[in-house]
Amino acid sequence: MPGFELFGDEERKHVNDVLESGVLMRYGFDGMRNGHWKAVELEKAISKRMEVAHTQLVSSGTSALTIALASAGIGAGDEVIMPTFTFVASFESIIALGAVPVLVDIDDTLTIDPKKVEEAITAKTKVVMPVHMCGSMANLKALKDICEANGLLLLEDACQAIGGSYKGKPLGSYGDLGCFSFDYVKTITCGEGGAVITNNENYATNADHYSDHGHNHVGKDRGAETHPFLGYNYRISELNAAVGLAQINRLDDFLVIQKKNYTVLREAIETISGITMRTVPDGGEENYSFLSFFMNDEETARATQKELVANGVDGCFYWFDNNWHYIKKWEHLKDLKSLGKLPEEVIKGLPDYNSQDFSQSDQWLGRNISVLIKLSWTDEEVNERAQKMKQVLSGVLLETK
Ligand SMILES: *Cc1c(COP(=O)(O)O)cnc(C)c1O
């Protein structure tokens, strides 16, 4: 997954353009910029690659999610449906607006289960937020049908699946709004950064203003601009955008490498009995940043992951026990530990996360192992890894039989 493995001359060139002008900010200082507008150029490049009308670059994937929600008018008391397996950012971005994170189970796609989404809809529900975890997507057709039938927005968190597609559309572009992260460990990176994409002009304008203190960006003079509504500083810097510009141009090359490495590993293990591969919805094309599969039971999966790591298969994850990605270990969120007091109106609307039943998610994630696909492996390294995985996976299964 990580674009940081392949930094090169292009990244350096774009960063140097910015350093030579000295204008590190994306707005203003027109006369000093030597014609360089890296954030603007990156927004155009993302819109083109993702086949959407509008892109708003921002400071992170987490802020992209908050801004996407805010741009559509989501606020206090509104319910946003999200999966149990994601990154803490999903929860944070919703509660930051005083909205209510409603968690529902995942299925064999490792993403949100459309049936569970339907069951969770109330009069307060406004948004369904699928998270395309580990390079592959939720069943977007089923989710879109549910959203259309119930008047809800579909917001895709594509932070981990940039470059994948669904029924011919780039992930992130299928819903009403889509979000990407360019943090240091994502498929393409700019250090810290994120983006909101949409075809809705109103949301795009709101996102543009909201991410810069509500500035309306009408003129050349920032000082003379007015503020139609409250906003915050979620701006990306010109330096980060410069790195991102080099990386977006390399995205399709990265995807080719990921797919090649993924395929070697997959072919080595997929026929071993007792292993089932993660389900990819019909019409979906992964971005191949992870190879994810299921073992027969939780005990075997936990032991197998340990053995894989002990045998040198690094970047091999057992997400079930991970405290960033799965609700089971989100004590601070489930107990609403915050530095200051959360507003009463927010607390009142929240479910008791500690007493909810997520046994369906436990069933899938408890049996899952995910292996990170790297870009920098040589063919020899990939083949060696494939052999090791094959040996360990066959061996463990023999022992437990
Ligand atoms: C990384 C990530 C985010 C947040 O991105 P940051 O840029 O790190 O804030 C959100 N959702 C998912 C699924 C992620 O993996």
Image (tube, grey):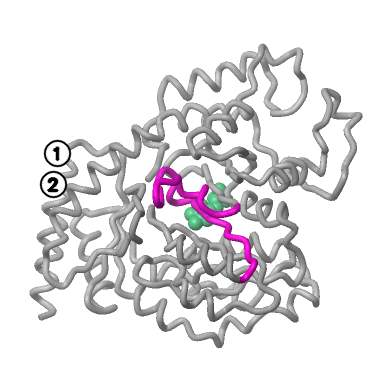
Image coordinates for residue 165, horizontal then vertical, percent: 40, 48
- Amino acid beneath label 1: Glu
User: Along the horizontal axis of the image, is 265 left or right of 318?
Assistant: left
**What residue is shown with label 1?**
380
Residue 290 position in % (x across, y down): 32, 53
Is 158 a magenta residue? yes
For label 2, the residue is: 384
Disc 1 element? helix
Mark 2 C-beta closer than 8 Å to ligand 1: no
In this rendering, position of residue 28 left or right of residue 164: right
Q: Secondary structure at mark 2?
A: helix
- Whether residue 76 is situated above or below residue 379 in the rendered picture: below
Total numbered labels placed on residues in the image: 2
Q: Main secondary structure of the magenta part?
A: loop
Quarter of the image with the C terminus in it: bottom left
Number of other residues with Cα within 10 Å of mark 1, as a class: few under 14, some 14 to 19, many 20 or more: few
Q: Where residue 145 appears, x then y in whole percent?
A: 51, 66
3D distance between C-alphas at marks 2 and 1: 6 Å
Q: Which residues are magenta?
A: 150-176
Vertically, is 115 above or below 160? Answer: below
Query: From the viewer's perspective, is residue 224 above or below residue 33?
Result: below
Q: Are marks 2 and 1 in contact (CB under 8 Å)?
A: yes
Which quadrant would residue 240 be assigned to in this image?
Answer: top right
Question: Residue reaching furthest front?
Answer: 149
> What residue is at 68 percent from the left and 25 percent from the top?
24
Please identify the quadrant where the N terminus is shown: top left
Q: Nearer the viewer, residue 150 or 220?
A: 150
Q: Quadrant of residue 389?
A: bottom left
Please state which amino acid type lies under the numbered disc 2: Glu
Say which of 143 and 149 sits in front.
149
**In the rendered structure, does residue 60 fall within the stretch colored magenta?**
no
Quadrant of the rendered image containing residue 149:
bottom right
